[in-house]
Amino acid sequence: METLFSEIDEHERKMTAPLAVRMRPRSLDDLVGQEQAVGPGSWLRAAIENDQLSSVILFGPAGTGKTSIAHIIAATTRAVFVEVSAIGGTVSDLRREISAAEKRLALGGRTILFVDEIHRFNRSQQDALLHAVEDRVVILVGATTENPYFEVNTALLSRSRVVELRSLDDAAISRLLDNALASPEGFAGAYTLDDDARDAIITMAGGDGRASLTTLELAAALVAPGTPESPQAITVEAVHAANPHRGLAYDKNKDMHYDIISAFIKSMRGSDPDAALYWLARMIEGGEDPKFIARRIMIAASEDVGNADPQALLIAHAAFKSAEVIGYPECRINLAQAAVYVALAPKSNAIEAGIDAALSEVRNGPLREVPSYLRDRHRPGSENYGEYRYPHDYPEGWVDQRYLPEGLERGCFYHPTERGWEAYRIEATRRDRRRK
């Protein structure tokens, strides 16, 4: 039974909770950002407002509102709302909640089961949810920062709807800060935030609403509180003192890792040295293995530059050796040199296209015989193989001789570009052969 004292205790707990918890929205109208996911006309908003929710996976970066949406569902639904965190939870916890939900269903009650960080449950643990979701014993609300199409069982996904949340934009972060400064649950007008401090918090947050509120709270702790009539200003110096190092999201094994390395490779391919340096810096700052970065530069040196500038592979290999021998922080310079070289080099994918075409022919074409005059001569009867003309016996070091097997003609695989060293050598070869 609730008493006056229990209500006071609850109020005290709320006011001593972190700012991000105190500012958690109580309704969809209070939720900042994510209009594409829960705005007017969206499926999720209609399902929550009509209390007709079916199983859903909320997917998005940290601090974008997944847990807040779950709490809004809990506050608005007539179903019983229960929560299991995959961080510390077990299959036994899931089975206990499912068993309780079955009993509840027999009496006509519904159960919404919120599983936070659902990707942390392995495949067999996720299987424990499958029949309960399929039979609607529970309505699953799963939250994950990882791509559910990789981290959640296909069978579970097919029975759920995936709703993607996006990183909050600058305007949304600014609104969160204003709400926290003015709200009774926040600072109730005791502080203001100057423009430089606001910009610093927005930049540090990187689209993470929770991170922005945490930085605001830490900075406020360094400033004596004022009153609504005479508020104290939170300065950019206080913000930097509270959070001196910006923490950009980077997971070396998951989506962010692959997205950033993809952007890095495409920037080098697209001949943009500034973009290549930016994405390289993101990986370095995220603690990426320098040898992994160097391997990707080596691949790009052949895949995207090739013989338009053969020197690119040598420089990329030197950067790899530097990363292997020197390590951070000095090897950042070697990696930057190689990445910029590859970005600025003339581009040709003729080598990759050529070997892939040759492999396709070998795998799918007929078995073609080696021309007799090209065969090894160290066997009985080789004197009947026909004449092999040794190129070095000719003034230009070249003789017009067929090397491909019958059925294939010169130029069937390798199509050089008209760029860089590749173009120069092809034209020189054509000139030499025209003189014959």
Image (cartoon, rainbow, N blue to C red):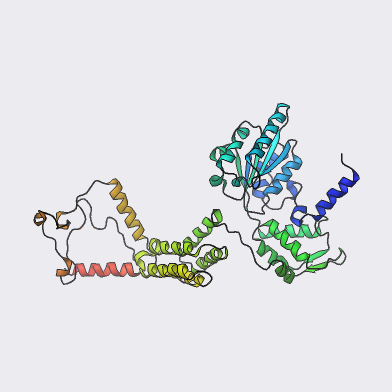
Residue 191 placement, left or right of 86 = right
Q: Residue 161, how many percent across, how many down?
A: 60, 40
Residue 325 placement, left or right of 99 = left
Q: Please identify the residue farthest to the right as the structure is shown.
A: 4
Q: Is residue 2 above or below residue 104?
A: below
What is the quadrant of residue 344 in the picture? bottom left
Q: Please identify the residue farthest to the top as the structure is shown.
A: 106
Quarter in which the N terminus is drawn: top right
Which residue is nearer to you in this view: 232 or 175? 232
Whether residue 419 can be seen here: no
Whether residue 70 can be seen here: yes
Q: Residue at x 69, y 56 (%)?
A: 209
Residue 432 placement, left or right of 329 = left
Q: Residue 224, how many percent across, how many down?
A: 83, 68
Quarter in which the C terminus is drawn: bottom left
Q: Residue 372, how many percent across, how many down?
A: 15, 54
Q: Residue at x 87, y 41 (%)?
A: 2
Q: Residue 252, how many percent across, how many down?
A: 54, 57
